[in-house]
Image (cartoon, helix red, strand yellow):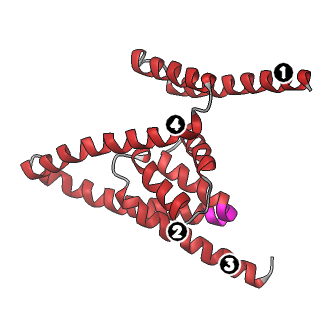
Amino acid sequence: MGKSEKKYRFFLCVELFWSFFKLSPISFGGGFAMVPVLEREIVTKKQWIEKDKIVDIFALAQSAPGAIATNSAIFVGYQIAGVPGAFAAMLGMVIPTFVIVVALASAFVSFQHNEHVLAVLAGIRPVIVALIASAAYKMAHSALIDKISWLICLGSLAVLLFCPQFNIILVILTGALLGVIITSIKVRTRDREA
């Protein structure tokens, strides 16, 4: 790797860090609420990753252990600048959140029953639901591309809504297994027709 390429990668990592550092404090409601904001920054504004690829990254981030926001940052950083990019994006995502959570946790004990704080939290909750719904709607355009993907989605939704005791990991693994089986069938069918 040449000197100019190392310099470029360094500045790319700094930019990754800064992008996620800015996004982290506004990711109220967890990773899913952050999806539309992250998509706007990474896909639309920076144009680092294509829209179809970001959906795959979100799917992988959800499937991997850990917080979806941090996992997404790591996957995006890795796609853009390899291991250093993953590390920079992860630090950018984690540092502000860590500082805010520590500050809030230490202060929450003293003001947890304050009516103004409770009013703020009551106002934030519906916004989080809207952010998650918006993320689901945007991801649906890239993820639900045929009848089979719709069936997998609706089946998974039914299991998650009506069988809350069902393990989420099993739902994810079942979706992955169905994807492998369906793709194998499609490839065999295409090969026979060719």
| Vertical arrangement, residue 95 with respect to residue 27, above or below | below
Asked whether the viewer can see residue 98, the reply is no
Q: CA distance from mark 3 to mark 4?
A: 35 Å
Q: Identify the residue at horizontal 58%, vertical 40% (top origin).
A: 142
**Badge 2 or badge 3: first in the primary sequence:** 3
Q: CA distance from mark 1 to mark 4?
A: 26 Å
In what quadrant of the picture does the N terminus appear?
Answer: bottom right
Q: Are marks 2 and 3 in contact (CB under 8 Å)?
A: no
Q: Amino acid at mark 3?
A: Tyr
Where does the image place residue 47, in percent across and percent down from the top left?
A: 58, 63
Name the residue that disc number 1 marks: 189
**Which SS class for mark 3?**
helix
| Vertical arrangement, residue 6 with respect to residue 187, above or below | below
Between disc 3 and disc 4, the foreground one is 4
What crowding class fits label 1: few (fewer than 14 Cα within 10 Å), some (14-19), or many (20 or more)?
few
Name the residue that disc number 2 marks: 17
Q: Identify the residue at horizontal 50%, vertical 26% (top origin).
A: 168
Q: Which residues are magenta?
A: 80-85
Q: Identify the residue at horizontal 25%, vertical 41% (top origin).
A: 126
Name the residue that disc number 3 marks: 8
**Which SS class for mark 1?**
helix
Q: Amino acid at mark 2?
A: Phe
**Badge 4 or badge 2: first in the primary sequence:** 2
Where does the image place residue 56, in percent across and percent down from the top left?
A: 62, 43
**Badge 1 or badge 4: first in the primary sequence:** 4
**Badge 2 or badge 1: first in the primary sequence:** 2
Residue 83, located in which quarter of the rendered image? Answer: bottom right
Where does the image place residue 22, in percent across and percent down from the top left?
A: 42, 66
Give left or right: position of 103 versus 45. left
**Which SS class for mark 2?**
helix
Where does the image place residue 25, in percent across and percent down from the top left?
A: 36, 60
Number of marks in the rendered image: 4
